[in-house]
Amino acid sequence: MAVTTTDLIMGPADLYIGSFGATEPIDTAINSAPAASAWTDLGGTQDGVKLSVDQTYTALEVDQVVDEVGGRLTKRLFTVETNLAQPTLENLKFLLNDGTAASGAGFKSFEPIYASSATQPTYRAVILDGYAPGQLRRRFIIRRCLSNDKVESSYKKDGMTLFTVKWQGFYVSPSIAPFKLIDATS
């Protein structure tokens, strides 16, 4: 296979977060930022944004054949992870899947959710806007997700304070795919 240099991709991605069920940008708007009324720009990132889709296929076996005769998809785990370079209380609320924010003269505060673990978490949707082959745009939409990994932040004299985050996607419905990829073609 010959190398097609225009298919090589390099460059940063932008991250947006919205409510679960937020109106998604139409496919033809791939070169435009998502509507600010439905999507919040999470700001700068550091060390890139990683998209991961981990699929597990369970083997089909029969006594009459020594080889596995096929496989069926039995599990899929898809995530987006990054380090947010803007460790604001607003971003922390998204990373901890909601909470209570307050502000007043000269202060802002945040308290995490502390209700029973039996309550439904606040699901969100995430958009990753990056590059596709040909230096065109690619959009990855996770339609229902939670921040479900350890959120860390460190303060160092010789490094930036960051928020680590990993959003895991979840099933939506029988008629709605859990994620979608859109590439611009011109």
Image: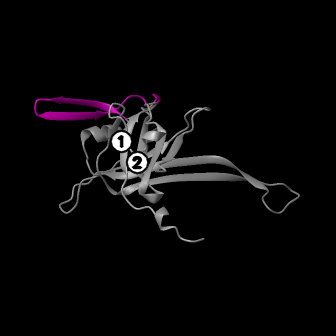
Q: Which mark is residue 129?
A: 2
Is residue 28 found left or right of 39 in the rendered image?
right
Residue ID at (18%, 34%): 108
Q: Nearer the viewer, mark 1 or mark 2?
A: 1
Residue ID at (57%, 38%): 177
Residue 141, compared with residue 130, is above or below; it is: above
Residue 149 visible in the current orientation: no
Query: SS class of the residue under badge 2?
Result: strand
Residue 8 in the magenta stretch? The answer is no
Residue ID at (21%, 59%): 156
Three-letter code for the amino acid on which mark 2 is drawn: Asp
Q: Which mark is residue 33?
A: 1
Q: Residue furthest right?
A: 64
Residue 143 is situated, as x and y percent measured from the top left of the image, at 48, 37
State which region is magenta. Answer: 98-120
Q: Nearer the viewer, residue 95 or 86?
A: 86
The type of colouring in the image is: one colour
Residue 116 is situated, as x and y percent measured from the top left of the image, at 42, 29
Three-letter code for the amino acid on which mark 1 is drawn: Ala
